[in-house]
Amino acid sequence: MKIINLSKIEKNSFDELTVWLQKDLNSVNKIIEKNLEVNAPLITKLSNYIVSSGGKRIRPLLTLATAKFLGYSGKRHHYLAAVIEFIHTATLLHDDVVDNSKKRRGKKTANYIWGNKSSILVGDFLLSKAFKILVEDGSLKCIDIISKVSEKISFGEVKQLMAVGNLNLNESDYLEIINFKTAELFSASCQIAGEISEINDIKKNSLKNFGKYLGVAYQIVDDTLDYFSDEKLSGKEIGNDFKEHKMTLPLILVFNRSNKKEKKYLEFLINKNTISNNDLAWVIDKMKRYNVLNDCLHKARHFSIMAKDSLGLFGPNKEKDKIIDFVDFLIHRTS
């Protein structure tokens, strides 16, 4: 079922950004490849598999785009973008173990191929590489930003684990979780670009808020796509979050809007060990009935507008326009 579609303009906005930053991306890729050249075939093979598995490199793109938008002309942003990608990749490896996932971006997960132990250990290796690069960069402020975000991501993952199957979770609780587990890394991606560009504290705070609001919007869309995307386009099995009993915004809204009988049945489903396709179809049908898709996307657009408004301190220019277009792409994406 196709509900969310990208226009040619939105597709072009991502293509234009990657073309604009292609030389920078190539430099980041070389740094990543160099740091994966170790005398341990498992690390190299598993790391290369997950790093090259079709992700859009959204977070390092944010670091590169923000630095360029601010007029930075050095090379430190290449290394810091690699740091962001290593941290993100490590969290993916750990997440797939926690969620017992078998597929990501249309491919088998690393833990499905190499096992949980290997995935956890290689994830730890990538985190250690990220901090090694940070120390070599030498900015105590960047180290502070990344160390804090690493702590917050871990805290968010624990909070999400504690919320599994909790139908009493409210929207505020959900927003707090995604702020920790997703938005903080988006925010850090922009903050570190501001640090090396030596802008004033007011503008640094604007970049921090830009990344935070964009990250929240991104995660809301991601959670909504879990129920409403085209599996062929997304590469993800529809309804994974529900099958894993994760409390995301679509499920919170449909539960709050359901009548007594429906709530009782949802409680029964969320406590089942195995969710069938018929169970999932019933939930999605109720989401359609209660207009959950539109309301989730409206909420995501709200945060995306807040993200754009955060850049108001910066004067109009072509680089800023590219970032604004990138925001729109992320909110209207299909995967």
Image (cartoon, grey):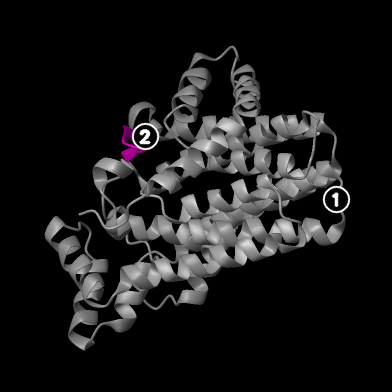
Residue carrying label 2: 109
Q: Amino acid at mark 2?
A: Thr
Residues drawn in magenta: 102-109
- Residue occupying image coordinates x 61% and y 28%: 25
- Residue occupying image coordinates x 22% and y 88%: 260
- In the rendered image, the quadrant that contains the N terminus is bottom left
Q: CA separation, marks 1 and 2?
A: 40 Å
Pick the front one: 132 or 283: 283
Pick the front one: 145 or 119: 145
Residue 204 at x, y = what percent? 79, 56
Side (left or right) of 21 relative to 104: right
Residue 230 at x, y = what percent? 26, 49
Observer able to see residue 151: yes
- Residue occupying image coordinates x 57% and y 58%: 214
Residue carrying label 1: 199
Side (left or right) of 74 relative to 156: right
Q: Residue furthest top?
A: 39
Helix, strand or loop under label 2 = loop
Helix, strand or loop under label 1 = loop
**Mark toward the start of the polypeptide (1 vs 2):** 2
In front: mark 1 or mark 2?
Answer: 1
**Does the magenta run of residues contain 99?**
no
Residue 16 at x, y = what percent? 53, 37
Q: Amino acid at mark 1?
A: Ile
Q: Residue furthest bottom?
A: 260
Task: Establish if 284 lies above or below 41.
Answer: below
Residue 11 placement: quadrant = top left
Residue 272 placement: quadrant = bottom left
Residue 81 placement: quadrant = top right
Task: Establish if 73 lies above or below 269.
Answer: above
